[in-house]
Image (tube, rainbow, N blue to C red):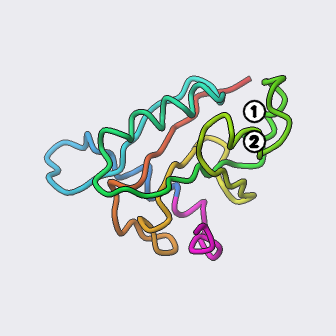
Amino acid sequence: MTARLDDTDFAELAARARTQSADAPGSDTERVTIRSLEAISADSLATLHEATESNRVEPGEPVFVLSRANADLLLERDAEIDDVGDLESALGRPVRVEDDMPDDTVLLLDPAAVEGEELVAPTGVACGIVGTDE
């Protein structure tokens, strides 16, 4: 399922997703859902997931894509989450940790919504912009 993402440049994909806001003025094309996240937490990721549920057009298996630093922060902050498997259980979604993913961005995407770095189905992608997280 997520093998489709194996050759993706996540830094480039995140940059493209950040410029595809559904709230862009004058835009009538399909766009990515973008939300601001105050901090990285299981709750903020669940909020991002909830925001996408009403915008999804086709059923898919959304996958969270996190940077290594954000994954480590989640594991440090939540005593009940010991590893990525626990995080997947808490979120009810698969999680990919990618070294080239920017620390200020979290993606939630249906693997079929992207081809490499191209957004082929923008409504299948959500982008969380992480604020300064200390």
The type of residue carrying mark 1 is Leu
Residue 68: % across, % down: 77, 48
Residue 62: % across, % down: 50, 53
Between the residue at mark 1 and the residue at mark 2, the CA separation in whole angstroms equals 5 Å
**Callout 1–callout 2 Cβ contact below 8 Å:** yes
Residue on which the image places disc 1: 74
Magenta stretch mostly in which secondary structure? helix
Q: Nearer the viewer, residue 32 or 79?
A: 79
In this picture, residue 117 sits left or right of residue 52: right
Residue 7: % across, % down: 63, 76
Quadrant in which the N terminus is drawn: bottom right
Q: Which residues are magenta?
A: 1-13
Residue shown at 63%/51% (left/top)? Answer: 94
The reply to whether the magenta stretch includes residue 55 is no
Residue shown at 33%/45% (left/top)? Answer: 21
Residue on which the image places disc 2: 71
The reply to whether the magenta stretch includes residue 11 is yes
